[in-house]
Image (cartoon, rainbow, N blue to C red):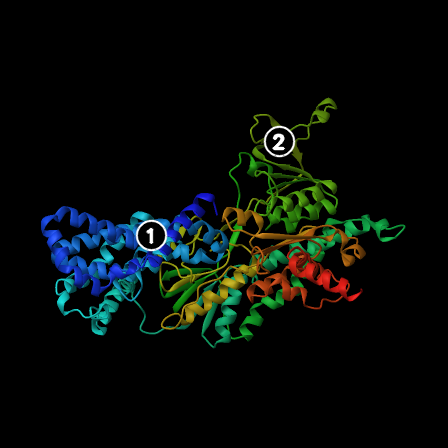
Amino acid sequence: MKASRWILLAAVAAVVVLFFVLDLDRYFTLEFFRAQQAAIEEFRRENMGLAAAVYFAVYVAVTALSLPGAALMTLVGGAIFGFLWGTVLVSFASTIGATLAFLLGRFLFQDAVQRRFGRYLKPINEGIRRDGALYLFMLRLVPVFPFFVVNLVMALTPMRTVTFFVVSQVGMLAGTMVYVNAGTQIAQVESLGDIVSPGLLGAFALLGIFPLLAKWTARWIQTRKVLRGWKKPSSFDRNLVVIGAGSAGLVTAYIAAAVKAKVSLIEKGEMGGDCLNTGCVPSKTLIRSARLVSEIQRHESFGIAEASARVEMADVMDRVRRVVDTIAPHDSVERYTGLGVDVIQGEAQITGPWSVEVNGRTLTTRNIVVATGARPRIPPIPGLDEVGYHTSDTIWSLRDDPGRFLVLGGGPIGCELSQAFARLGAGVTQVEMGPRLLGREDREVSEFVEARFEAEGIRVLTGHRVVRFETAVPASAEGAGGREEEKVAVAVRDGSDQEIRLPFDTLLVAVGREARVEGFGLQEVGVEVRNGVIDTDDHLRTRVPTIFACGDCVGPYQFTHAASHQAWYAAVNALFSNPFKRFRVDYRTLPMATYTDPEVARVGLNEREAREREVEVEVTRYDLAGQDRALAEEAAHGFVKVLTVPGKDKILGAVIVGPHAGELITEFTLAMKHGIGLNKILGTIHPYPTLMEANKATAGAWKKANAPEGALRWLERYHRWRVR
């Protein structure tokens, strides 16, 4: 906390302490006012303006400092100034005082609270930004909630000051009028509790609930408006229709069938979607083959005198296809039919909120879940179509040596495939527009991966942008009279106009993926698309209340496990949210992994995100260079980094760079999900020798850094005494 905040906090605390030490609260009692009422009224008659000003100032001070007495001051306002002027004075004084208390609480505490708990307050902050005025209005209408508490709590949120002032002014008016009116009859008031009877409190409670009812009514009207013009069937063929049989669609259909709902799953392409056919499965299969080649090339470090490998790209790709074919039955039509899912192969067209057309027939359904996935993004670079290119969808058709292999993109897909093809013998150049590879990771992670890439012969060009593609006759061929043209990418570096020419034989475009949101009637029925993805609420419901969406077509994370995670929420909310409970999708413990060598995995916050969100963290790092199993595996490179609440073992995030990081991160994911701290990880027996021990060693490093020094000094004295 800054010095100015400490000074102000000390000043406020001093004023509050003096208020009670000097027994000033005795002046804010009903008995004191009655004893002085005649004198106060005489002063008001002779000095109306001054009396009003003094009363106004005292009221503002009392409420600004959250001192007891605001209720009595309101009552006195009615007794001294009457109903009209009393209401005017109290209304503005209470609002100004509340706003000053709001600003005071914000200045003193908001930064510290948001920095420390911002990750957990994010849903609340988003709710306040969206519906904060409504929440505050409801609280102001109900006198049951202490107003000083409301002031302080709202100060910790991102609510705008002008919103707080205006809503408070309007929301407190009803309660103010009740108290001021009671003050005009103060002779009949025996205590402040007599003013608001249980019946009146009930009326205020109903008044407070009214905005919520109004919101529900508005939502109902909006729903009716969206569905207007569509005829709802009198009965339905099925409970759920799922469009897309990738990870999200398969899990959605599986859950629906498991709870005995009647569900149809429609897929126009291959079952299993991108993950099985062009994504996770083929890429990890390729990576494993490439790692074997890398290990053979390092045979001497394993104590092997001679070893060699000859790579035939066609054979490698045959293995990729064999693994895909082996896994395919897990996602097959036959398996899902056996589970009770009505699988339809064809192109779906949403024709209404309750209907989907496929293969010339119309299916009626209570709800629809869209899980159409994503496709590779193709940048509009001049000459790209002319030179030809591969994407992560088409690279698996490669049969020959890729030769000079140019990769556009430094994200997870680009990095994984760059390293894999380099290890399989291609001469790889990787171009990334951003300042570093894996831009969402911490800088040290990116630098670690880049250093490994360069050590393996990959040419990494970060901060470079390809501006065009062209074909040209190589200079060496011109001198020899040759005419064969080669493909060239022309790039420029950030801050420079100088062009760099990059000849290549094979081009892979891996600059991200875009959601599939067009061509199947989504917008025609009123579903909105924002920032390239289907717009859903926190329950994965679209603007059309009968249509949900999940997976890559929604984001914000395009991972198979993220799609499966969302699918549970989409299925359960589609089947049970009306009229039962709705479930808000939770990404707080969603792990991520990039399968380069070294692998990169994380869960929760990393340091970059902690800085951006201004969350205070304690960072504990353990280097794998000394880890026993990593040394035995000739893979002692990387680190484990854990972010915790300062001085506590509560885990806010973890980052692992090293062998099998994707597996190792699961322990931290489990710990975060179930509130397990580093102390309990340290107290858990890990088998030796395993890489998993690195997690325990990190917990040990945290424990050592947070050792109770005072207690250890006393123990040292005790043990010294014991040996005398």
| Residue kind at label 2, given as amino acid type | Thr
Is 346 on the left-hand or right-hand side of 134?
A: right
Indicate the position of residue 141 as horizontal and vertical percent values. Answer: 25, 62
**Label 2 secondary element:** strand
Can I make out residue 315 in this image?
no
The quadrant of the image that shows the C terminus is bottom right
| Camera-nearest label, 2 or 1 | 1
Viewer-side residue, 98 vs 225: 98
Image quadrant of residue 661? bottom right
Is 320 on the left-hand or right-hand side of 68?
A: right
Q: Residue furthest top?
A: 479
Whole-number angstrom distance, CA of label 2 to CA of label 1 = 69 Å
Indicate the position of residue 617 as horizontal and vertical percent values. Answer: 56, 52
Q: Residues within 10 Å of mark 2 (few under 14, many from 20)?
A: some
Residue depicted at 51% across the width and 53% down the height: 374
**Which residue, given by chain and number where applicable, does mark 2 sit on?**
471
| Residue kind at label 1, given as amino acid type | Ala
Q: Residue furthest left?
A: 45
Viewer-side residue, 445 vs 72: 72
Residue 101, labelled with which disc?
1
